Amino acid sequence: MKQFKMLTNRCVHLILNIGDFNFSILSSFLLIITATLIEIITVFTLDKKTDEFNLLRLIFFISFTVVVTLYFLSKVIKKVEQSRQSLSRLIDQFEIMRARDFFHQDALKKINRDQDRFISTISHELLTPLSGIVGLSHILLDTELNPDRTQYLRTIYINAFTLIHIFNDIMNINKIEAGHNGAR
């Protein structure tokens, strides 16, 4: 009988000393339920007498365990609420980042469209005069000219022809990049 009372007192002492120490909810409830059951068994079975003192002690002990249980439940509810608020903030931040990503993707698509339009316009504007220079210089090379003028005309022709090839290479690279961007 003394051993049960000592065990009960130890359980009460342990519950009092728990304070802000973070026990898991399950272990806290098990401790409270075990202590309550031990106290009930002690009062009604081992003492074999239920006087007013034991009954008051039982009522006090059960009231105390309810208070401790409510304390732990309030701590758990507080932690759950903090976690819910943190999760809510994270969801809001995720939504903002997703909206920014969507905005940036649209901006990138617009930039790519503008770049394609620019390259298309520039290709027409540059290739037409270059083709004219190449064609006319080729025609002039078939005519009789003095050697200096023929050399100047040949230089114009070669340079214009080289520019056309460089420009076509740039256009091919742009087409390859557009194909890769469109595939994504």
Image (cartoon, helix red, strand yellow):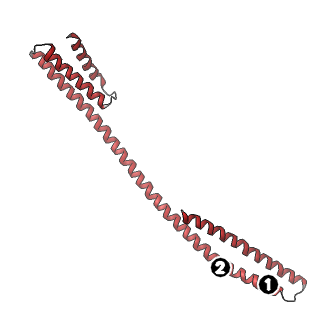
Disc 1 from disc 2: Cα separation: 21 Å
> Identity of the amino acid at label 2?
Glu
Instruction: Tell me if 175 is positioned left or right of 50 in this view.
Output: right
Instruction: Tell me if 19 is positioned left or right of 168 in this view.
Output: left
- Helix, strand, or loop for circle 1? helix
Q: Which mark is residue 138?
A: 1
Please tell me which residue is depicted at 29% across the width and 30% down the height of the picture. Answer: 26
Q: Neighbour class for label 2 at 10 Å: few (<14), some, many (≥20)?
A: few
Pair 1/2: label in front: 1
State which tag comes first along the sequence, 1 or 2: 2
> Identity of the amino acid at label 1?
His
Instruction: Determine which quarter of the picture holds residue 68.
Output: top left
Whole-percent x, y for residue 127 in the image? 68, 79
Q: Which mark is residue 106?
A: none
Q: Residue furthest bottom?
A: 144
Question: Do tag 1 and tag 2 residues touch (Cβ < 8 Å)?
Answer: no
Please tell me which residue is depicted at 26% across the width and 34% down the height of the picture. Answer: 73
Instruction: Determine which quarter of the picture holds residue 52.
Output: top left
